[in-house]
Amino acid sequence: MIIPSGLSDAVLFHVDAAMRIINRRVEILMQETFELGVREGLIMLAATSDPPLSQGCMADILGVNRNVMVLEIDRLEKRGLVKRERLPANRREQIITLTPKGKRTLAAIEKLRAQIRPRTWKSAQERANLISWGRSVIEAEDPQEPARKKR
């Protein structure tokens, strides 16, 4: 891709374009190898959280509509990769965890990710720097600050 001169110093353009390229590469590999998408892989990673995340919390963190999240988890559950568990303290809330099959699948996904990392990152340090930068942006987000309405 050629970067137009008007966008050569636009950070948002570079971050967005890089993410679209990486997501496209990963989506193709995930579909071909596991018949899973990037979002499903992220849900499975989120399901390894300790303490476990609720379905609603997972939707909010991943920026997925809650109704869509239900459908995604339904598909993963039907494939035996995740399971829902009701919380005794709040019967309406469900946490999402990996099944043994889900853990094996996630381990295989991690092997695939390790193989493609050299094509995406020049070094482990470059990847670590990007994660650190992303973490600082995410952690600085004020969850109480209302999102501006689109016009």
Image (tube, rainbow, N blue to C red):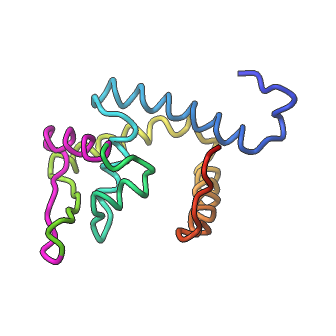
Estimate the x, y position of residue 149 in percent, counting from the top left: 60, 51
- Of residues 30 and 66, the one nearer the viewer is 66
- Is 36 located above or below residue 61 in the figure? above
Estimate the x, y position of residue 72 in percent, counting from the top left: 27, 41
Estimate the x, y position of residue 146 in percent, counting from the top left: 57, 63
Q: Kindly indicate the quadrant of the structure image that contains residue 132.
A: bottom right
Q: Kindly indicate the quadrant of the structure image that contains residue 27.
A: top left
Q: Residue furthest front?
A: 151
Q: Residue at x 57, y 68 (%)?
A: 139
Q: Residue furthest right?
A: 5
Question: In the shown orientation, is residue 96 left or right of residue 130?
Answer: left
Estimate the x, y position of residue 137 in percent, counting from the top left: 63, 62
Magenta region, residue range? 68-89
Question: In the shown orientation, is residue 95 left or right of residue 12?
Answer: left
Q: Is residue 84 magenta?
A: yes
- Is 142 located above or below residue 98 in the figure? below
Labels in figure, total: 0
- Of residues 147 and 21, the one nearer the viewer is 147
Q: Residue at x 30, y 64 (%)?
A: 53
Question: In the shown orientation, is residue 83 left or right of residue 70?
Answer: left
Q: Residue at x 64, y 50 (%)?
A: 126
Name the quarter where the N terminus is drawn. top right
